[in-house]
Amino acid sequence: MPSNSLKLTKEQQDEAIRTIQSYFEEERGEELGDLAAWGVLDLFMTQLAPYIYNQALRDARTTVNQRMASMEEDLFALEQKLPQTSR
């Protein structure tokens, strides 16, 4: 990633913390404090986010390539037939 780490807004961080805490409570029956939830978020952001980011770039690259191929086909379809010259 350009800046070495994914950045979240304060609102996104707060929502992520609440989501992590909710997950641990519902799925594991564990109450996670803010500091522990921040640790989990930091782990995800530093260790897992680069994999997800790179996959998203690969997916975007595939989509762009497909659209470019389609546009190229459309442009060829617009070519006009040249008049036949008689000799």
Image (cartoon, rainbow, N blue to C red):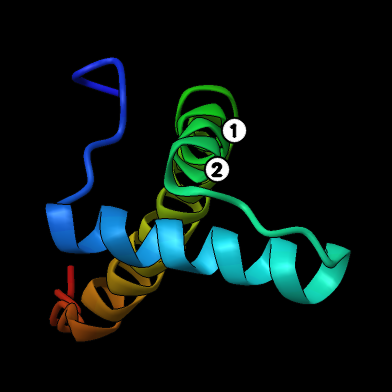
Q: Which residue ends up furthest to the right in the rendered image? A: 28
Residue kind at label 1, given as amino acid type: Leu
Q: Secondary structure at mark 2?
A: helix
Quick one: 39 or 48, which is closer to the camera?
A: 39
The x and y percentages for residue 85 are 14, 74
Whether residue 43 sits left or right of residue 53 in the image: it is: right
Judge depth for marks 2 and 1 and give the one in front.
1
The x and y percentages for residue 28 are 86, 63
Whether residue 57 sits left or right of residue 8 in the image: it is: right
Residue at screen point 57% across, 37% down: 40
Q: How many marks?
A: 2
Categorize mark 1 by other alpha carbons within 10 Å: few (<14), some (14-19), many (20+).
few
Q: Quarter holding the C terminus?
A: bottom left
User: Which quarter of the figure has residue 2?
Assistant: top left
In the rendered structure, find residue 52 and report the number of the disc placed on it.
2
From the image, tell me which residue sits under label 1. Answer: 48
The x and y percentages for residue 19 are 51, 68
Residue at screen point 51% across, 31% down: 39
Categorize mark 2 by other alpha carbons within 10 Å: few (<14), some (14-19), many (20+).
few
Q: Secondary structure at mark 1?
A: helix
Quick one: 84 or 44, which is closer to the camera?
A: 44
Residue kind at label 2, given as amino acid type: Ile
Quick one: 68 or 39, which is closer to the camera?
A: 39
User: Marks 2 and 1, how far apart in space?
Assistant: 7 Å
Residue 1 higher or lower than 53, as above or below:
above
The x and y percentages for residue 82 are 15, 77
Residue at screen point 29% across, 60% down: 14
Residue 87 higher or lower than 56, as above or below:
below
Q: Which residue ends up furthest to the top in the rendered image? A: 4
Residues at badges 2 and 1 in contact (C-beta under 8 Å)? Answer: yes
Q: Quarter holding the N terminus?
A: top left
In the rendered structure, find residue 3 and report the number of the disc placed on it.
none
